[in-house]
Amino acid sequence: MGAADLEEFSLLLDEKLLRFMDQLELLEEKRATLNSLIEQGWFSMSKARYSMGNKQVSPLQYASDIEPLICVHARTLDNGKEEFCTERVKQINESSKDVTSIEDVGPQEQGIRRRNKPKKNMAEKEKDDKANNKKGPKETLVVKCDQNPQQDPLKWFGILVPQSLKQAQTSFKQVIELSAEIATLQAAVLNTRQELKNSMKYKLILQEKASAPQTDNASD
Amino acid sequence: MAGRGKLIAVIGDEDTCTGFLLGGIGELNKNRKPNFLVVEKDTSIAEIEETFKSFLTRNDIGIILINQFIAEMIRHAIDAHLQSIPAVLEIPSKEHPYDASKDSILRRAKGMFSAEDFR
């Protein structure tokens, strides 16, 4: 190992250090955004509490069955880094529309029926029926699913909640998404730190090796 | 739970927990165990630590959010957790603003430039 190799390795080490600094800077920026968003959320929640009453926005209002509306996917990338990303769960109402359909079995005709229809009209009607059958299958009624376990948490606090509580919810939704980004960044910072630590140790070994022949020569 | 994703757990004061639950992270599983802990004045440190450790052992939790002043109470447990999953995030609380110098991750990163790293 020569001095040139050592210099090249030092450059690589500098590059890693710069990357580490960039990650720390980005982490600090995201942290500041997260803190301001949380503060905004609390402020909106306090406003809601002021208008709704002290006990109306408290843990006493939590539902007895709570289902998560957001989940986080943690995966390890090829370079060994961890990545966290959030995903919102789709509301059951949207997905179950096709499943909960009931066939209409009532009378097809509406209005007053005429018992003695002229033959000409009957023939026209038959034609119309045939045309309708060709158009497509029978229409079905869609029944909305009222018992939705994944209820919007906003409804725990009432049906008509103030706008400020909705604003608080929006702020906290943003905080949740940001927290996944911060978790990714934290993992990256720790990863880069470990890389730097190992590189520094290796550089020390290189330096010792590079200086060893010089000292041997000096002693001769 | 949808998409085999992991949960976000939260240990915090009343407003922090309410806010995050409004955001939609809350869950009560089959055993009626929640993924959140509302820390009140009478909540003991042992209870907080036990909950934190139970969150660490649960494999359906990806991120743990904890108020920094509560994290200070169980600092030894947080420092002992070195795995990347679940990730532990310290967040501010209403009465206690966020202090980067107390954050366990940033303290570890700062340790990069200590004399020990050069040995």
Image: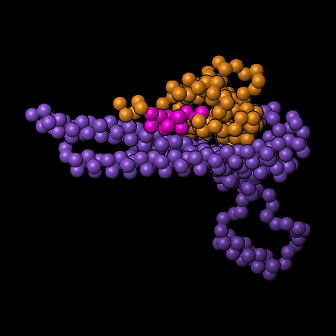
The answer to whether residue B3 is left or right of residue A62 is left
Name the spot of residue B40 as percent of width and height, x first.
75, 26
Q: Quadrant of residue A147?
A: top right
Q: Nearer the viewer, residue A65 or B74?
A: B74
Q: How is the image coloured?
A: by chain
Compared to residue A2, the image places residue A103 above or below, namely below
Let me know if residue B9 appears in the view: no
- Which quadrant does the N terminus of chain B fall into? top right
Q: Colour of chain B?
A: orange
Name the spot of residue A90 as percent of width and height, x first.
64, 50
Chain that appears purple: A
Residue drawn 49% across the image and 38% down it: B109
Part of the protein shown in magenta: B102-114
Assign the magenta stretch its main secondary structure. Answer: helix
Residue drawn 70% across the image and 38% down it: B97
The answer to whether residue B118 is left or right of residue A212 is right
